[in-house]
Image (cartoon, rainbow, N blue to C red):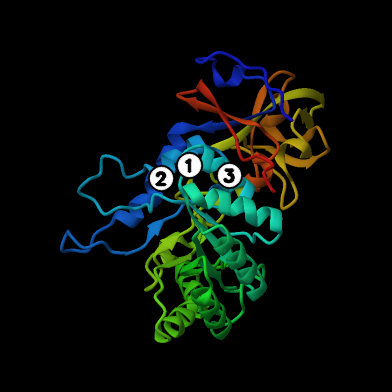
Amino acid sequence: MERPIFQPVGTPVESLDTPALVVDLDIMESNIDTLHDSFRQLLPDGETPQTDACVRPHVSCHGCPEIALRQVSADEGLIEMAPSCTGGIAVATLGEAEVFASAGFNDILITGRVITGPKIRRLLALARDNWVFQAVDNLRNVQNLSDAAAAEDAILGILVDIDAGYGHGGVSSAADALTLAQAVEDAPGLALMGLMTYEGPYAAASQLELQEESLRRLRVVNDAREQIEGAGIEITLVSAGSTYNYDVAARIPGVTEVMAGVYPLMDGQMSQFRPELQPAARVLSTVISHPVPGRAVVDAGHKTTGPDFGVAALHDVPGAVATRFSAEHGILELEGEATGEFNPNDKVWLVPYNLSLCVNQFDYFRAVRDGKLVGYWPISARGRLD
């Protein structure tokens, strides 16, 4: 567990104790506005939204209720504009759902499976006071959820999860989705709400290629929707897309919501694909050694940055590259003018490659504005994989 030194509001950011996970609120708010604005755009008549889809923020990547609140309230004060947000959120685990429900969020989609008996009982307890959607992809799970819900005289919203090419979870065909939807429709205690999928990210060399690949991958979802509705079963929600292809997924007919996740804070991985969104979350680190001109050492390593998918990058310093990390330390290779910089006690910024893995190393975001600390925001869902 992180044991931060709490410093007073107004502390200059570069005086914070390190390593520290810092979120720049101005950049974060700009990112939220940028993405949500694309859902508020109107057709030339000035009245009809360009898309019927809204954003359902997937908050597992940051685990912070303070950030989620700013996502779901992004439309406040924009009365004359098309709404951009459902008001609901998505999480990966039941434990995360419990955390966000305790923080006041009551419209929650759980995208991971809830399988075991103890977890199903916790899920139903959560559903008594909150509108909870649970994703499913197998008949046995549907039966178990139904038996437990009927015994508790509860109603649980269900989405059928469809694999659109990511190869993680979900049924593999429209026919299988229809079979599962029919089982949910007939199951006591369950209410079929719709379909969900996660189809990316994937390599795309251009916006046109991104659009074509998104359409191709989501074809199975639209096929499933058509088959299910053709069987007389109503589909209310179709949840698809991500930060990676939010602007494409939102305009695919039939998609009602986009589960964008990393967009408020961004990371090195997603910044390759969405240059209009900037890294708002970075790790502040201190140089602890500069033993030779071509090398400096900082106090942030693998245990800080979460390197499983890729290493953190040094932010905007010409001639300096973060090349390798040990458990506790990072190595900067220096050339040119950079060899004269990075003396002990200097500060450097690292952009994590994968935000979720980095966030899981910390208990708090240090929230800053105009270069000064404004508060410590708990990462309340950290480690809630249960």
Q: Residue at x 80, y 39 (%)?
A: 325
- Image: 56 above or below 296: below
Where does residue 131 sit, x and y in percent of width and height? 46, 53
Disc 3 residue crowd, few under 14, some 14–19, many 20+, Cα 10 Å: many
- Image: 239 above or below 333: below
- Image: 197 above or below 90: below
- Check disc 3 and report its element: helix, strand or loop: helix
Are the residues at dot 3 and dot 1 in contact (C-beta closer than 8 Å)?
A: no
Question: Mark number for residue 288?
Answer: none
Where does residue 179 sit, x and y in percent of width and height? 56, 82
| Amino acid marked by disc 3 | Glu
Res 62 visible = no
Q: Residue at x 52, y 28 (%)?
A: 367
The mark that comes first in sequence, 3 or 1, is 1
The residue where tag 1 is placed is 68
Disc 2 residue crowd, few under 14, some 14–19, many 20+, Cα 10 Å: many
Res 125 visible = yes
The residue where tag 2 is placed is 72
Q: CA distance from mark 3 to mark 1?
A: 14 Å
Are the residues at dot 1 and dot 2 in contact (C-beta closer than 8 Å)?
A: yes
Q: Residue at x 67, y 20 (%)?
A: 17
Where does residue 187 sit, x and y in percent of width and height? 53, 73
In the rendered structure, the answer to whether residue 38 lies left or right of residue 125 reads left
- Check disc 2 and report its element: helix, strand or loop: helix
| Amino acid marked by disc 1 | Ala
Mark closer to the observer (2, 3)? 3
